[in-house]
Image (tube, rainbow, N blue to C red):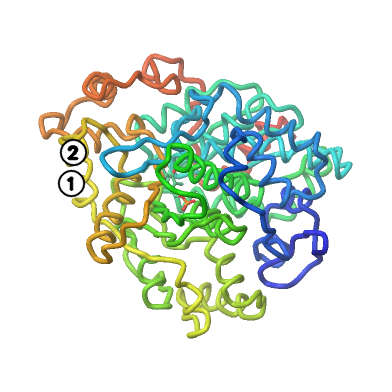
Amino acid sequence: MDNLIYKSTRGQGEAVSASQAIIRGIAEDGGLFVPNYIPKIDFNAKDFSKFDYKELAYIVMSKFFTDFTEEELKNCIDKAYDDKFDTNEIVPVKKIGNDFFLELHHGPTLAFKDVALSILPHLLKTAVKKQGINKEILILTATSGDTGKAALEGFNNIDGIKIIVFYPEVGVSIVQQLQMTTHNGNNTFVVAIKGNFDDAQKAVKEIFTDEKMRSQLNEKGFMFSSANSINIGRLIPQVVYYFSAYLNLYKKGEIAEGEKINVVVPTGNFGDILAGYFAKSMGLPIDKLICASNKNKVLTDFINTGRYDRNRDFYVTNSPSMDILVSSNLERLLYFVSGENPEKVKSLMESLSTKGEYSIDEDMKNKLQDFYAGYASEEETCYVITDLYRDYKEAIDTHTAVAYSVYKKYEEDTKDATKTVILSTASPFKFPKSVMSSIDKKYDGVNEFELIKELSKIGNYPIPAGIKDIDTRPQIHNTVCDKKDIKNVVLNFLKIK
Ligand SMILES: *Cc1c(COP(=O)(O)O)cnc(C)c1O
């Protein structure tokens, strides 16, 4: 095979190296960077089971980040997967009843986004150095909750990089808000925006495309970059834990060499499940990729009918990190199932932006056979939390519960007995209100910080360090700004003008 390089899903612009793709985040034509082929791994469970998480991470990532030297990549991996995670397995698998939960929430902010955001800053810093760029990088991120704190942790005190996180004044949970406003780092800044997530996201996008602002910052030695989930520096690190989960089941004697497994992924922006698709394409024995949505079930409808339609009501649910109607990473899947046809992707994306919908042809639809899709209502999400606690005294968070509920329906519909791994994307401590009310109605109306202590007691789990005493930490960030003032807030933070 030729050297692996990155191209835009929409076909315009030059092909770039991995480090350039990481720095740019998004292609010039508005498309997403995709590798020109998905590399294969000569996988067999017996030989691979001797590798620990970091060794596995190197094997997978080195296939994609081809212009990083072995030393550079290993250095990034060492810095990312250390004692920030409360287990050296990094992503352990827990068996509850007959089901397997891949726990991706053992990082500093208690959500799976830590797995990618703890390495992205190191990849970015290395990439900037490789490309001989001598500007300071400014990361601007709008968050609906989980990305913000994970990015603050990941980029904390990394020299050469500054980060500003914007979160909506309304919409984030109390725990999520405090995680951000009590964050202490010398290169980090947190701002609440008056409005909802869409307002925050839109305001940030406007800065990115403001030419005047860009050149003003450029003159002062700054350059923009992005930490959101369309960056391949976030996508590829997620491929690793699918391999890790498979090997975990193999080592426990749950599956035989070469036996296929299913995975169930609670999905929002389609990044996590796309990483699973990459793992499968690389040669990991995965059968079905089960895409689980909440009440915002645009992906369930798409996978089942071939028609994507965002013209519908938006719901705020008890799994807020999946409340999304435009799943950006789906564009990469469209690219692959169209037979790597950028013209087709471009016209579908144009239709999405002008009409809010598009339909794929039969050929493309047939290639979605790897996927199964379903959704869970808020009530169904609560029911499975209730059931698991009643039967096994285990608490799961609401996002994981969406996946679990969809899996139970899948099992019933298909009678498929393939061993299945459910991705557990957040700790129940992050959403104490919804989790505890599902476990027992008597917790309705109880203060969130009391609920955290109570959850620790009834589940016999220690309170994770990331949120311990969060209600008594000093508030560091209390800037609230209007959408129209956001540019001044950025300039002030950088001490420009
Ligand atoms: C972001 C998030 C998701 C959705 O992941 P995508 O990669 O956007 O599909 C699911 N669960 C939790 C807890 C999250 O924070």
The reply to whether discs 2 and 1 touch (Cβ–Cβ < 8 Å) is: yes
Q: Position of residue 191 (x, y in %)?
A: 52, 35
Amino acid on which disc 2 is placed: Ser
Q: Position of residue 136 (x, y in %)?
A: 78, 36
Amino acid on which disc 1 is placed: Tyr
Q: Quadrant of residue 466?
A: top left
Ligand 1 contact, mark 2 (Cβ < 8 Å): no
Q: Residue at x 51, y 40 (%)?
A: 113
Residue 213 visible to the viewer: no
Residue 373 in the image: above or below residue 350: above
Ligand 1 contact, mark 1 (Cβ < 8 Å): no
Q: Position of residue 337 (x, y in %)?
A: 57, 74
Residue 14 visible to the viewer: yes
Q: Residue furthest left?
A: 442
Numbered label attached to residue 336: none
- Residue 13 is left or right of residue 486, and the answer is right
- Residue 230 is left or right of residue 469, and the answer is right
Q: Residue under circle 1?
A: 383
Looking at this view, is 293 or 450 the one in front?
293
Q: Quadrant of residue 392?
A: top left
> What kind of element bears circle 2?
helix
Q: Residue at x 47, y 79 (%)?
A: 365
